[in-house]
Image (spheres, grey):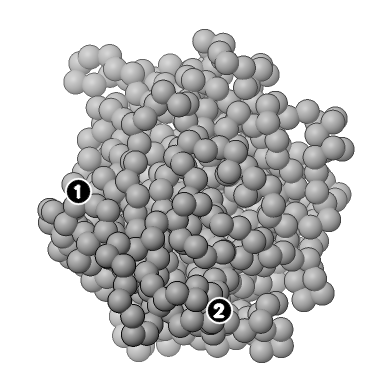
Amino acid sequence: MALPSGFLGLLLLLLHGMLFGLAQGDVHLYDFVLKETSFTRLCSSKSMLVVNESLPGPVIRVTKGDTVFVNVHNQGDYGVTIHWHGVHQPRNPWSDGPEYITQCPIEAGSNFTYEVIFSDEEGTLWWHAHSDWTRAGVHGAIVVMPNNDTGFPFPQPDGEEILVLGSWYKGDVNAEVAEDLEDGSDTPRSDSYIINGQPGDLLPCSAENTYRWQVDYGKTYLLRLVNAAMNAELYFAIAQHVLTVVGLDGSYLKPVVTEYVMISPGQTMDILVTANQTRPGRYYMAARQFDSVRPDDTDYDQTNATAILEYRGNYTPTSTPIFPSSLPTYEDIKSAIYFTDRLRSLADQDHPVNVPKNITTMMYISVAMNSITFDYEGTSRSSLSSSLNNVSWVNPTTDVLLAYYRNMSGFYTTDFPDFPPTLYNFTADTAPDYTTDTSQGTRVKVLDYNEEVEIVFQGTTVLDASEDHPMHLHGYTFYVVGSGDGNFDNETDPANSYNLVDPPKMNTVSLPKRGWVALRFKASNPGVWLWHCHLDRHLSWGMNTVFIVKNGDTPETSIREPPTYMPSCEGSLPIRLLNFDDSNERE
């Protein structure tokens, strides 16, 4: 049963939050109305599901430690869920949002109120749909201000700007993806990238509505950058302006002065920009794809999305804004590595680093593209798949969280492997033939409360499809303690490549092509938490798993009781992560 909308329903939720002692700061209320809205981009019009008739959707603004209640009214034509990306939701996986992991979809014509609990996050985060590919239109920024005791760890900015980078599809992307997954075709590529919902001057029928940011000479602004693109890491730059990156994924960094950034899908950045050009004018802010697939594969979105930074004042602008010469080219992998290698946690008194050092669980997870054979209308077909440790995830019919909490059997197994089933040269030019096969299943990893965990993700060259994978963990941030090329060596790499002093703290990290990345976290947030690649095409093919973190010894270290109004799983059928009964499986 859906919670009644309006004051009474929200009052019940407020009482529920206070009962469990989690509403520490201020409480904020938001209404999200999801409905089909008409948009015209790239010379054609279509209807798509968005929140409150806007793309991107409304900004949620809080102070560190606040609680937000978001009443989601689904006036669309299909079920949807919303995830609060980077919000830890302590003890509250019920409002985390991924469909068939922590809830079933909010069906059309119903509503559900999320309780979003902020704790130690500070900076920029975001929210987005976590069902099918609906997040292409359903997303927006979250601004978490520091409390008065600490303030910003840098001089107070004179102003703020939010830029959300996204993907635009001319067609109905959910319908296209559903058809592709059913018949085994590849999933669609975007028709352009967008900045705050607009493709920009360089694309057809787009110049009139290009997004503009007005600035005053001499002032410094805090730019909050979100990569909401569906399947692409992006380069971003502002012509003739230096970027100082001071935050990533809701945590502060030592300042990184740069002429460009590389931002993975799912990541958010806080960037200081000073309007210091003595000649007032207009300057392009531009984003283009960083493509890490092999050079002969050029089937990707090669558009350049632009917005305009323009100085206020009386002057005659040039006919065309200046384009950033510092923006790296599509396949410039060295610039991506150079940028990410410079990231370090701030690690000061108000923002300490606490890297786990007594590791009790060690996991080595190979990340691969695979193929699956299945029957389609009486003929045998092959489809792309993806896996973690050779397990390709399949959604259950009831969400994992409810099945775990109610001790319901038959919906998942607790045997996700800590290591790949076979070891080989993961980054050789050619992978063994047997590595293309994968096993489908709903297999989870169970962790004891307060375990200290190290995970090494290992890239592979299976199907000659090596590329970066932005790996995202729900419910946690983690320390990225090391990364490198080739196969991980558990003797030399920790000794020579790990940073345990000031590693960056992230919720989404890019596993480098033909390389590895190591991360650590303490399993101190009980619940059911999704791990997945934030390239939605890989998520659709099964590149994810679930961590179940068991309760501690006290009520304060245990999962909260579920709300009584969770969406029902009846009548909801996922269009993605399907189980092909006739697939080839290797145990």
**1 and 2 marks in contact (CB < 8 Å):** no
Q: Which mark identifies residue 220?
A: 2
**Residue 560 picture location, percent across and down:** 58, 68
Which quarter of the image is occupied by the N terminus? bottom left
What residue is rendered at 24% in x and 52% in y?
Answer: 203
Between 279 and 533, the residue placed more toward the observer is 279
Q: Which mark identifies residue 170?
A: 1
What residue is rendered at 64% in x and 25% in y?
Answer: 420
What residue is rendered at 50% in x and 69% in y?
Answer: 224
Q: Quadrant of residue 196?
A: bottom left
Q: Quadrant of residue 405?
A: bottom right
- Residue 157 in the figure: left or right of residue 370: right
Q: Is residue 210 above or below residue 177?
A: below
Q: Residue furthest top?
A: 433
Mark 1 or mark 2, whichever is nearer to me? 2
Query: How would you rate the neighbour count of disc 2 (Cα within 10 Å): few for under 14, some for 14-19, many for 20 or more?
Result: some
What residue is rendered at 33% in x and 80% in y?
Answer: 315
Helix, strand, or loop for circle 2?
strand
